Image (spheres, grey):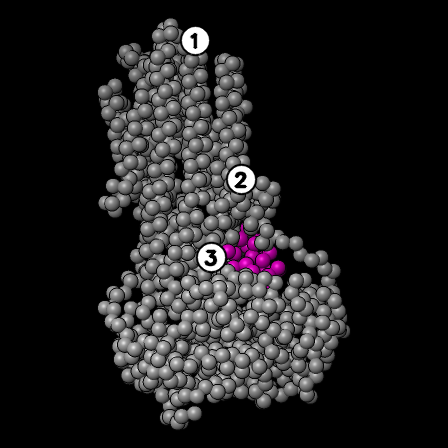
Amino acid sequence: MTALWRIVVLWRPQAGWLLAGVAVSLAALAAALLLMAQSGQMVAAAALGAGLAAPLVLRGLGLARIVLRYGERMATHDALFRALAALRVWFFRGLAVRAAGGLGFRRAGDVLSRLVGDIEALDILYIRIVVPLAGALVLLPVLVWWIARSNVWLALVVGVLFALAAFALPLLAARASWRQGGRIAGAFAALRIACLDTLTGLREVRAFGAEGRMLAIVQGREAGLLAAQHEVAGRAALAGAAAFLAGQAALLAVLVALLFQGDAALAGIAFLVVAAFEAAAVLPRVAAAAGHAAQAAGRVLELADAPMPATHTTSVMPSGSAIRFDSVHFAWSPDRPAVFDGLTLDIPQGSRVALLGPSGSGKSTLAALLLKVAHPGAGRILLGGSDIAALDDSAVRARCAWLGQATHLFRDTIRANLLLGAPPGTAVTDDRLWAALAAARIDEVVRALPDGLDGWVGEGGQGFSGGQGRRLALARALLSDAPVLILDEPCAGLDATTEREFHLALNEAAAGRTVVLIAHRLVGVERLDRIWRLSGGRAVAAAG
Amino acid sequence: MRAARREAGPAVALGLLAAMAGIGQAICAALALQAALSGAAPRAALWPLVVFAGLALLRAGLGVLMERVAFDTGAAARRRLRSAALGRILAAGPAMLRRHHSAELASVVVDRVEALEGLFARWIPAAILAVLGPALVLLVVLWVDPVAAAVLAGAGLLVPAAMALSGLGAAAAAHRQLAAMTRLQARFVDRVRGIATIVLDGHAEAEARALGRSADELRRRTMRVLAMAFLSSAALDGALAVAIVVLALRYVAALAGGTLEMPGHALMVLLLVPEFFAPLRGFAAAYQDRSHAGPAAEALAALPEPPLAPPALPVRNVAARGVAIAFEDVRFTWDAARGPALDGLSFRVPAGETLILSGPSGAGKSTVLEILLGFVRPDSGRVTLNGADIATLVPSAQARLVGWIGQRPVLFAGTIRDNIRFARPEASDAEVEDAAHFARLDSVAAILPQGLDTPVGEGGYGLSGGQAQRVAIARAFLKNAPLLLLDEPTAHLDPATEAEVLDGLKRLAIGRTVVLASHAAAAHVFAGRRLDLRDGRAAPARGVA
C-alpha cells in the first residue's frame, strides 16, 4: 500500500484539480442526501397533519443535484486524466534515465502494459477510492449527528452499520485482494507479451508453421487472465452483497425505531439512510480491485524509480576530444566473464581509428562504456583529459554521435527521424538535411518518394531495405555536431558496393572529426590512422 | 446478436426476480411506515419487517448470482472473439506487418477485445432489464395510484430519449478516443524500442514532452466522449429528481387537502421511485460499455477475412531430395510509389541445387524469398514447387517445406533452448542440443550462467548479433526442411565465425534445395548458379560460379 501512497504524493502538482474534484463531489452528495431527506420528511409530516415545508427548497435541491452530479463527473474525470498523463510522462523520463543501454531483459510488451494498463488501473485510486472515501468520511459524523437528534441509540446502530459498509468491509476486501497478489496485472502483461511476441515474430511464426502453437499460448495466457478476473469479480460481488445487507439492516433499524417512536423526522431519516448507503455501496466492490491497483502502482514505481548509482558530475565540457582508455576492467554482470581486462587504448583528437574483433570480443561494449551506458569496474576513461565518470552523461553524449547496430528508425517521417540526430532545440534547414542524406548516399531514394522528407518510415525502418535504413541512420549521425563519431558496424547488412560507397562518403563527410569505426572486418577503402584488434579483453595495435 | 440475447436469458431472469423482491420490500417498508405513522401497536407491523428482512437476504443472494452469470457470459464472448481475431491475423501472415505496427495489432487482440467485455456481460442483460424492470414497478404503482404511474412513466421515457440524443454524439467521440488511444500505444512501444537511440541523441526530454502532449490530447478526446456520455447520466438524475419532486409535492398537497385517504400508498410510491430507476441506472452505466464496444467491434471487423483454403494438393517428391523451384514471369509491387519489386522475373532451380541471388539492396532479393516463404502472393506470373503452383498450397504445407534464416531473427521471450525448439516443438533435448552444437551455440552457452537455459529478452539482450543469428541457424537445422532459404545469414558475423557458419550451412545444404540471398563475398564458397538481380529483373547471366 505504500506504493499507492507514493503515487498520490507524485500527484502533488495536480493537487488543485484533484481537490476541486473532491469538493464538487461532496457538494453533489450533500444535495442528493438533502433532497431525499426533505421529500421523505415532508410527506411524513403531511401525513401527520403537520405544516408544509417549503416546496421551493425541494425544487432547488432537485436542480442542484442534477447540475452538481454532472459537474462532479466532469471535474473528477478531468483531474484524473491530468494526473494519469503526468504519471505517463514521469514514467517515460524515469525509464529514459535508466534504460540507455536498451531494454535488457524487459520486454517492450511488458513496458507497454505497465504504461497503458497499469497507469490506467490506477484510475480507480482517485475516482473510485479517494473521492467516495472522502464522501463517506464526511457523511458518517453528519449521519450520526442528524439521527441522534431524534434517537441516540438508532444513531449508534446506523453509524456502526455505515462504518461497516464504508470502512470495515472495504478494508477486508482490500486485504484479501492484496494477498491475491495482483494476479490480474501480471496475467494482463503476460497476455500482452504473448500477443506482441507472436505479432512481432509473425515472419518466424509463419516460416515455422507455428500459428497453432502461438494461438494456444495466447489462449493459455487468456485463460490465466480470466481465472484471475473471475476471482476478483466473485469477491467484488460478495463484498457488494455484504454492503447491501448492511444498508438494509440500517433501514430495518430505522423502521423498527419508527414503530416505537412514531416521529415524522424518522421517516425522513429512512430516506436519508437509503441515499447514504447507496453512496457508500461502491467502496467494498472497489476495494476488492484495490489489490490490483496497488500492484500496478508497485510495478510502475519499480521500473521508473529503480535506484540510480549516485554520481557527482559536472556539466563542464572537456577541452578536447582525445579519448583514452586506461586499464579498464569490465564485465556485464559479476557471474559473466570479463569483457575487458586491463584495456588501454589511445585515440588522439581528429584521428580515425578502427577497432576490429570477432563477435563477442566486446566491440559494442566499448561503445557502451564510452557513451556512459555502462560503467567500468576498474580503470578510467578520459575524454579531452577529464574522467568521463565525473562528466554529465549529456555532456559526454553531446560530444559523441553514435551509429550502432541497434540504432532504431522510428515510426515517423524521415525528417523527424533525421532531426533526432541534431542537438535538441536547434533549427535545421532542409539544405542541411539533404546534405546529410547526400553524404550518406541515400538522397536519391528519398527524393524519389512522393512526400520527400515528409515520407513515412514504417516500424523498424520498414518501407526501406536494410541498406537504405542503415544509410538513413548514418545521415542522422552525420547531422550531429559532435566531434567524435562512433560507428558500430555501420555496414552490417549492406552489399559490397554500397558498403564501399558508404566508406568513401564517410571519408569526406567526417573530415576533421574523430572517427571510431567498430567492425569485424575492413573493406579496404577506409581512410584510417590506426587499427586496433580486440582480443582477450585487451586492444592490440594491428597496423597503422 | 440474437445468440447473445439468448445467452443473456439467465441474467435477465435473475434480474427480474431481484426487481420483484425490491417491490416487495418497498411494499413492506410502506406498510411498516404507515403503521408507525398511524400510531398502531408495534406488534401489528412486525410481519412486514420480517418479510422485508427475508427479501433483503434474497436480493443479496440474487445479486451475487447475477454477477457470476454476467462474468461467465462476458468471458465466453472474449475467449471466442480473441481467438478469432488472432486467427485472422495469423492467417493473413507477415504481409500485415507492412501495413500495421505490431503494437497496433496487439492492441486489437488484447485491448479491443477486452473493451467488448461489457457489451456481453452487462449491456445486453441491462438493455432487456431496462424495459422489463420499470414496467414491473409501473404495474404495481398503476394499481395503487394511476396518476403517479403516469408521472413515473413520463420521467422514465425522458431517459432513453436523452440517451439516444447524447449517444449519437458519444459514438463518434468514442471512435476518435479509441483511435487516439491506439496511436498513443503504438507511439509508446516504438519509442521504448528505440529508447537507447533517443537517450544517446539527447532527445529524451523532447520525447517525454511529446509523449505528454499526446497523453494530453488523449485526455481532451476522452473528456469530449465523457461530456456526452455524462449527459445521459444527467438525464437520468434529472428524471429521478423530477419524479421525486413532482410526486412529493402532489402527495403533500393531497394530504393537506385531505383528498388522499391512504398515506401509506404515498410512501410506497415514493419508496418505489428508486426501484423504478434502478434498472435504468444499470442501463446507463452499461451504455458506456456499448459505446466503447462499437469502435472495438469495427476494429475487429476490419481484420482481413481468412483466405479461402486452397484445395490441398500433394507436393510431389518432397523427400530429402529437395524441391525444384520455378519462377515464371513473376511480378510483385509492395508500394506503387516505389515501383515494382519484381518485374517479370523468371528462373529455375532444380531439386537439390543452390541458387545465389545477388544484387544491390532493394533489387528484389528479399521479395523472392518472401514469395517462397508464402508471406506474399505474386501479383502475376507463376511460382511452382515441384511443379505445383504455390497458389494451390495451404500455408501450413508450404511452411513445412521451407527452412529460413533471415537477416534479423526475432527471439521470443524464453530461454535459448525454447527459442531453438521453436522450430520443432516435439524435438527431444538431445536433438535441440545437436542443433545448438551444429550452429556453434554450445560454445556460446558454455560461458553463459545458465547455459542453453539462459533467458533472452527484448531483441535478444545478452546475445550479440552473431549469437542471435546462430540461434536462427540452429532453428533451421532442427527443422530439417527440404528447401532452405537464406537471407544474408552471415551479414553480422566476423570472418572467423562467418567461415564456421558457412561451413555449417554447406553441410546443412547437402541434399537440399538452397536459395541464398547475399552480397557478401564469402557467399562464393557456395557452389551454385548465380542470379544477379537488378530492379526486380535478372541481369545478364554471368555463368556458373
Residue at 28% across / 84% down in the picture?
A: B329
Which residue shows up at 48% across the image and 33% down it? A283
Q: Residue at x 44, y 72 (%)?
A: B476
Main secondary structure of the magenta stretch: helix
Both labels 2 and 3 in a single chain: yes
Q: Which mark is residue A295?
A: none
Disc 1 to disc 3, C-alpha distance: 64 Å
Which amino acid does the dot numbered 1 rest on? Phe
Residue B182 quadrant: bottom left
In the visual, does A473 lie left or right of B350?
A: right
- Disc 1 vs disc 3: Cβ atoms closer than 8 Å? no
Query: B152 or B419: nearer the eye?
Result: B419
Residue range in magenta is A87-111
Distance Cα–Cα, label 1 vs label 2: 44 Å
Between B45 and B89, the one lying in front of the other is B89
Alpha carbon separation for disc pair 2 and 3: 24 Å
Please name the residue that numbered disc 2 is placed on.
Answer: A178
Whichever of callouts 1 and 2 sits on the residue coming sooner in the sequence is: 2
Using a 10 Å C-alpha cutoff, classify the residue at mark 2 as few (fewer than 14 neighbours), some (14 to 19) or many (20 or more): many
| Mark 1 or 2: the one toward you | 2
List the residue tagged with mark 3: A193
Q: Which residue is mark 1?
A: A260
Query: What kind of element bears circle 3?
Result: helix
| Few, some or many residues within 10 Å of mark 1 (<14, 14–19, 20+) | some
